Image (cartoon, helix red, strand yellow):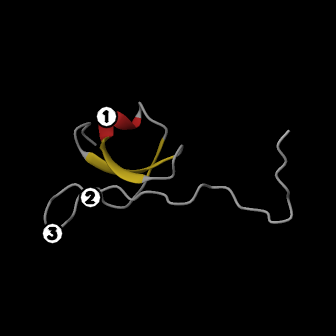
Amino acid sequence: MPENDWVRVTDKDTGHRLSVRQSAVAHGNYNVLKSPAIDPVTGDVLPPEFNTTSGQSADPKKEITHG
């Protein structure tokens, strides 16, 4: 795959899905997806999909203490 081609990735640090150039994959903490990075109808690069969860689950049984 040419390095100027677009690929869809998940950023392992944030969980965001975005389209990046193939050449950028080696420089980031990405997981390459099989889904397209380009809209097949318009040919535009797909916009990012932001992860809205923090990756942490709240445990109501735990108390937060400040000391």
Residue at left offset 21%, top offset 63%: 39
> Residue 15 versus residue 65: which sits nearer the camera?
65
Q: Quadrant of the N terminus?
A: top left
Instruction: Determine which residue is flagged by label 3.
Output: 41
Q: Is residue 63 above or below residue 40?
A: above
Horizontal side of residue 28 vs 57, given as left or right: left
Under mark 2, the amino acid is Leu
Determine crowd level at label 1: few under 14, some 14-19, many 20+ residues with C-alpha closer than 10 A. Answer: some
Under mark 1, the amino acid is Ser
Residue at left offset 19%, top offset 66%: 40
Q: Work out whether mark 1 precedes mark 2 in sequence or the reverse, and give the earlier one.
A: 1
Mark 1 to mark 3 CA distance (whole Å): 24 Å
Quadrant hosting residue 66: top right
- Image location (x, y in percent) of residue 44: 17, 57
- Image location (x, y in percent) of residue 9: 41, 50
> Residue 7 versus residue 45: which sits nearer the camera?
45
Q: Is residue 28 above or below residue 40?
A: above
Q: Secondary structure at mark 1?
A: helix
Horizontal side of residue 54 vs 47, given as left or right: right
Instruction: Determine which residue is flagged by label 1.
Output: 23
Under mark 3, the amino acid is Val
Residue 12 disc label: none
